Image (spheres, helix red, strand yellow):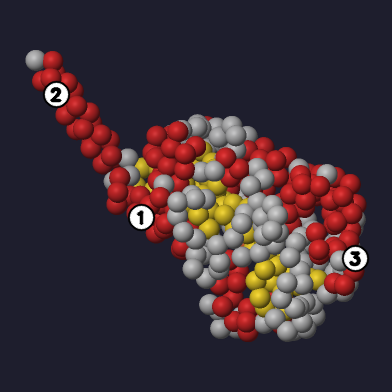
């Protein structure tokens, strides 16, 4: 008798789950481009029956969440860089969530300790160096960027860009404010030109002979190789993962946060868990040539496996403002 009641109860749960899955949806606001996330959302829908509706935008999503307030249909926000995840948190549009699956799937350094944001892929900030003019092994660490032998030979984008801010924040975390500031000033002293352009523009400058070393995110290497116009730029450089004999290369994330008051909260959490699972990670990391956050999943074939810095990105986030002021103090962009 007891078994029968349990059996009925279990059947009832199954029917309810199937019914709610039919009507189920989750609404995503995404700064990530459609080609990056659509294959993943499709895999999630195929598996769970939960539809994923996405609003794509290049900017303004945090402002939109703010103005929509409690009426917002959004459940999750997807973006790149700890800086932007941190900004969404500071804007008060996200809410913390914690589950055992998220904690098990995502290394602690790549998620907020309070559950306000979760990293879903990582990107290494590495060196692109001239094949012809920079001998193998002659630059191995971020610290060596200040070596006088590179005077007038380094190109970077603005010191105020989120990618550079995070790197500077990591230098503060590892070396303290004073040494980090000396480092940033030393790097500035070695620049071949005023900071300008994006990560790819620096490689273009190496190809043009304007400089010999640049700092950029790893995935641009493959993107340039895949673009006929940019292929020669990529072919003029070697990729160097910094600090491999020490703490590892600085990494950043793409990630997601649960929106405050998410109307489809359970489905949103299910999607986050799927993306962090072995299956989701295998799909996600490979569409953009990014690295999985999951240590169980292999990274892109185009670049070697590398040692990543395990510094908490929450710590990097906390030091961002200081890093920005530092860039101003050393007049990095000046
Ligand atoms: Fe990028």
Task: Tell me the CA gap for discs 1 and 2.
Answer: 33 Å
Q: Is residue 237 above or below residue 5?
A: below
Question: Callout 1: few (<14), some (14-19), or many (20+) C-alpha neighbours within 10 Å?
Answer: some
Q: Which residue is mark 2?
A: 8
The N terminus - image quarter: top left
Task: Tell me the CA gap for discs 1 and 3.
Answer: 49 Å
Query: Does 283 sit left or right of 307 as displayed?
Result: left
Determine the residue located farthest toward the front in the rendered image: 245
Residue occupying the point 65% across, 51% down: 309
Q: Which residue is mark 3?
A: 189
Q: Position of residue 196 (x, y in %)?
A: 78, 68
Q: Position of residue 171 (x, y in %)?
A: 78, 50
Task: Tell me the CA gap for discs 2 and 3.
Answer: 74 Å
**Label 1–label 2 contact, CB within 8 A:** no
Mark closest to the chain's N terminus, 1 or 3: 1
Q: Which residue is mark 1?
A: 42
Which element type, helix, strand or loop, lies under badge 3?
helix
């Amino acid at each position: 008798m007891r078994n029968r009641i349990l059996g009925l109860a279990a059947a009832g749960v199954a029917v309810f789950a199937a019914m709610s899955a039919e009507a189920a949806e989750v609404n995503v606001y995404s700064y990530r481009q459609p080609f990056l996330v659509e294959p993943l959302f499709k895999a999630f829908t195929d598996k769970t029956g939960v539809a994923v509706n996405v609003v794509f935008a290049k900017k303004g999503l945090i402002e939109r969440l703010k103005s929509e307030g409690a009426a917002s249909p959004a459940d999750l926000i997807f973006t790149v860089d700890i800086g932007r995840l941190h900004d969404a948190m500071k804007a008060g549009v996200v809410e913390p969530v914690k589950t055992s699956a998220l904690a098990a799937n995502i290394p602690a350094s790549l998620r907020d300790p309070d559950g306000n944001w979760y990293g879903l892929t990582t990107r290494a900030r590495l060196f692109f160096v001239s094949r012809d003019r920079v001998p193998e092994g002659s630059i191995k660490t971020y610290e060596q960027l200040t070596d006088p032998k590179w005077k007038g030979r380094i190109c970077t984008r603005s010191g105020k860009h989120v990618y550079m801010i995070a790197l500077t924040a990591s230098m503060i975390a590892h070396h303290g404010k004073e040494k980090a500031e000396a480092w940033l000033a030393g790097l500035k002293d070695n620049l071949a030109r005023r900071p300008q352009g994006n990560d790819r523009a620096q490689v273009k400058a190496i190809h043009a002979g304007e400089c010999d070393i640049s700092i950029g995110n790893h995935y641009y290497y493959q993107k340039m190789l895949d673009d006929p116009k940019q292929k020669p730029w990529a072919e003029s450089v070697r990729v160097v993962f910094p600090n491999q004999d020490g703490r590892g290369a600085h990494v950043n994330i793409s990630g997601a946060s649960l929106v405050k008051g998410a109307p489809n909260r359970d489905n949103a959490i299910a999607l986050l868990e799927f993306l962090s699972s072995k299956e989701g990670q295998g799909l996600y990391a490979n569409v953009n040539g990014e690295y999985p956050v999951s240590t169980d999943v292999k990274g892109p074939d185009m670049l070697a496996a590398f040692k990543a810095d395990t510094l908490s990105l929450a710590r990097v986030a906390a030091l961002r403002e200081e890093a920005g002021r530092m860039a101003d103090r050393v007049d990095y962009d000046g």
